[in-house]
Amino acid sequence: MTGIVIEDGNVEVDASVIAAGLQITPALVQSQLREGHIASRLERGEGADEGTYRLTFTFGRLQLQLVVDEAGSILGQTTTTARSRRSPTQASAAG
């Protein structure tokens, strides 16, 4: 079991899957989603990617992306850390 269920176009992801990718405890996932601290996005594959889904979860500077098939099997997973953007004055002072 992958912890991802896709049924009638709806996608359900177990908190433990999200927590592992975002480096938090499963107990925090639901409250952080509810409070808007974890953002989520679902994209359905088209054309050659038909039958796959890309799920993106962002928490602070961490971003978890999962690519899954219609059975909920994880085909790919990446967690990245976004670099903080420097303001123009910071860039000038640093350069």
Image (cartoon, rainbow, N blue to C red):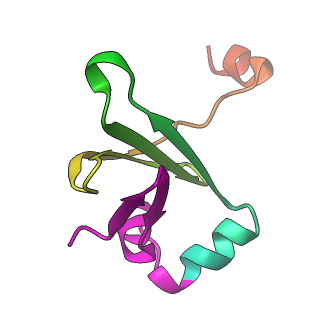
Q: Is residue 94 left or right of residue 92?
A: left
Image point (64%, 21%), residue name: 94
Image point (26%, 18%), residue name: 48
Image point (68%, 28%), residue name: 86
* Closer to us: 77 or 91: 77
* Closer to us: 60 or 74: 74
Q: Is residue 89 left or right of residue 84?
A: right
Q: Is residue 12 one of those drawn in magenta?
A: yes
Tell me where the magenta segment starts and ends, as one range.
Answer: 1-27
Residue 2 picture location, percent across and down: 24, 67
Residue 24 picture location, percent across and down: 47, 73
* Closer to us: 84 or 14: 14
Q: Does residue 61 lie above or below 52 as drawn? A: below
Q: Quadrant of the N terminus?
A: bottom left
Image point (38%, 29%), residue name: 45
In the rendered image, the residue lying farthest to the bottom is 27
In the rendered image, the residue lying farthest to the front is 8
**In the figure, residue 17 lies in which quadrant?**
bottom left
Q: Is residue 23 one of those drawn in magenta?
A: yes
